[in-house]
Image (spheres, rainbow, N blue to C red):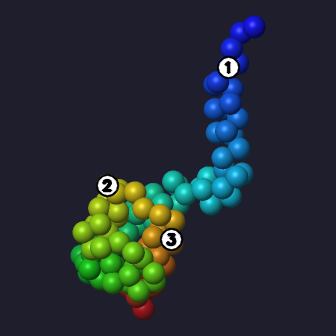
Amino acid sequence: MPAPDSSAGLVLAAKMAPALVGGRQQKQGLVMDDVRCAARDLLQRKDRGLMDLWILYWNHGGRCHPFEFDAFVHEVLPVDWFDVDALAIAVEELALERIA
Protein backbone atom coordinates (compact mmCIF):
# COMPACT_ATOMS: atom_id res chain seq x y z
CA MET A 1 0.00 0.00 0.00
CA PRO A 2 1.53 3.38 -0.99
CA ALA A 3 2.14 6.04 1.62
CA PRO A 4 -0.45 8.81 1.70
CA ASP A 5 0.51 11.93 -0.19
CA SER A 6 1.32 14.63 2.35
CA SER A 7 1.07 17.41 -0.24
CA ALA A 8 -2.70 16.89 -0.47
CA GLY A 9 -2.98 17.71 3.23
CA LEU A 10 -0.92 20.87 2.78
CA VAL A 11 -3.08 22.03 -0.09
CA LEU A 12 -6.23 21.44 1.94
CA ALA A 13 -4.77 23.28 4.94
CA ALA A 14 -3.74 26.21 2.74
CA LYS A 15 -7.26 26.46 1.29
CA MET A 16 -8.90 26.30 4.71
CA ALA A 17 -6.53 28.64 6.57
CA PRO A 18 -8.32 31.89 5.66
CA ALA A 19 -11.66 30.38 6.67
CA LEU A 20 -10.27 29.18 9.98
CA VAL A 21 -8.64 32.48 10.86
CA GLY A 22 -11.28 34.75 9.39
CA GLY A 23 -11.33 37.03 6.38
CA ARG A 24 -8.88 39.43 8.02
CA GLN A 25 -5.93 37.05 7.75
CA GLN A 26 -6.54 36.48 4.06
CA LYS A 27 -6.42 40.20 3.29
CA GLN A 28 -3.80 41.16 5.87
CA GLY A 29 -0.84 41.24 3.45
CA LEU A 30 -2.62 43.54 1.02
CA VAL A 31 -4.01 45.79 3.75
CA MET A 32 -0.67 46.00 5.56
CA ASP A 33 1.24 46.85 2.38
CA ASP A 34 -1.27 49.54 1.42
CA VAL A 35 -1.13 51.19 4.86
CA ARG A 36 2.66 51.11 4.92
CA CYS A 37 2.80 52.61 1.43
CA ALA A 38 0.35 55.36 2.40
CA ALA A 39 2.45 56.10 5.51
CA ARG A 40 5.63 56.40 3.44
CA ASP A 41 3.84 58.68 0.96
CA LEU A 42 2.75 60.97 3.79
CA LEU A 43 6.25 61.03 5.23
CA GLN A 44 7.81 61.92 1.86
CA ARG A 45 5.78 65.12 1.68
CA LYS A 46 8.12 66.64 4.31
CA ASP A 47 5.46 68.56 6.24
CA ARG A 48 5.28 65.83 8.90
CA GLY A 49 7.96 63.56 10.26
CA LEU A 50 8.12 59.98 11.41
CA MET A 51 7.76 61.02 15.07
CA ASP A 52 4.53 62.86 14.31
CA LEU A 53 3.12 59.72 12.72
CA TRP A 54 4.46 57.55 15.55
CA ILE A 55 2.80 59.73 18.20
CA LEU A 56 -0.58 59.38 16.47
CA TYR A 57 0.03 55.63 16.05
CA TRP A 58 0.95 55.29 19.75
CA ASN A 59 -2.13 57.28 20.81
CA HIS A 60 -4.32 54.83 18.91
CA GLY A 61 -2.93 51.75 20.63
CA GLY A 62 0.19 50.95 18.62
CA ARG A 63 2.82 49.04 20.57
CA CYS A 64 6.03 49.49 18.57
CA HIS A 65 8.98 51.49 19.88
CA PRO A 66 9.92 54.37 17.52
CA PHE A 67 12.85 52.39 16.05
CA GLU A 68 10.62 49.35 15.48
CA PHE A 69 7.97 51.64 14.03
CA ASP A 70 10.44 52.97 11.47
CA ALA A 71 11.29 49.41 10.43
CA PHE A 72 7.58 48.51 10.34
CA VAL A 73 6.70 51.45 8.08
CA HIS A 74 9.58 50.62 5.72
CA GLU A 75 8.51 46.94 5.54
CA VAL A 76 11.56 45.57 7.33
CA LEU A 77 9.76 44.29 10.42
CA PRO A 78 6.54 42.25 10.54
CA VAL A 79 3.92 43.30 13.08
CA ASP A 80 0.56 42.19 14.46
CA TRP A 81 -2.83 43.21 13.10
CA PHE A 82 -3.53 45.66 15.92
CA ASP A 83 -0.40 47.62 14.97
CA VAL A 84 -1.61 47.73 11.37
CA ASP A 85 -4.99 49.02 12.54
CA ALA A 86 -3.35 51.67 14.72
CA LEU A 87 -1.16 52.76 11.80
CA ALA A 88 -4.18 52.94 9.49
CA ILE A 89 -5.99 55.24 11.91
CA ALA A 90 -2.87 57.39 12.38
CA VAL A 91 -2.33 57.71 8.61
CA GLU A 92 -5.96 58.66 8.09
CA GLU A 93 -5.82 61.23 10.88
CA LEU A 94 -2.58 62.73 9.57
CA ALA A 95 -4.01 62.91 6.06
CA LEU A 96 -7.12 64.67 7.37
CA GLU A 97 -4.95 67.18 9.24
CA ARG A 98 -3.27 68.05 5.95
CA ILE A 99 -6.63 68.76 4.33
CA ALA A 100 -7.91 71.00 7.13
- Local secondary structure at mark 3: helix
Q: Position of residue 37 (x, y in %)?
A: 40, 62
Cα separation between marks 1 and 3: 38 Å
- Local secondary structure at mark 2: loop
Q: Position of residue 42 (x, y in %)?
A: 34, 72
Q: Nearer the viewer, mark 2 or mark 3?
A: 3
Q: Earlier in the sequence, mark 1 or mark 3?
A: 1
Q: Earlier in the sequence, mark 2 or mark 3?
A: 2
Amino acid carrying mark 2 in the image: Val
* Residue appearing at x 52%, y 55% in the figure: 30
Q: Is residue 28 left or right of residue 55?
A: right
Q: Is residue 24 left or right of residue 64?
A: right
Q: Position of residue 56 (x, y in %)?
A: 38, 84
Name the foreground residue: 21 vs 88.
21
- Quadrant in which residue 71 is drawn: bottom left
Residue found at the very far right of the displayed protein: 1
The residue to which callout 1 is attached is: 5
* Residue appearing at x 41%, y 67% in the figure: 38
| Cβ–Cβ under 8 Å for marks 1 and 3 | no
Q: Earlier in the sequence, mark 1 or mark 2?
A: 1
Amino acid carrying mark 1 in the image: Asp
Q: Nearer the viewer, mark 1 or mark 3?
A: 1
Q: Is residue 81 left or right of residue 52?
A: right
Q: Position of residue 4 (x, y in %)?
A: 70, 18
Q: Residues within 10 Å of mark 1 (few under 14, many from 20)?
A: few
The residue to which callout 3 is attached is: 82
The answer to whether any part of residue 95 appears in the image is no
The residue to which callout 2 is attached is: 76
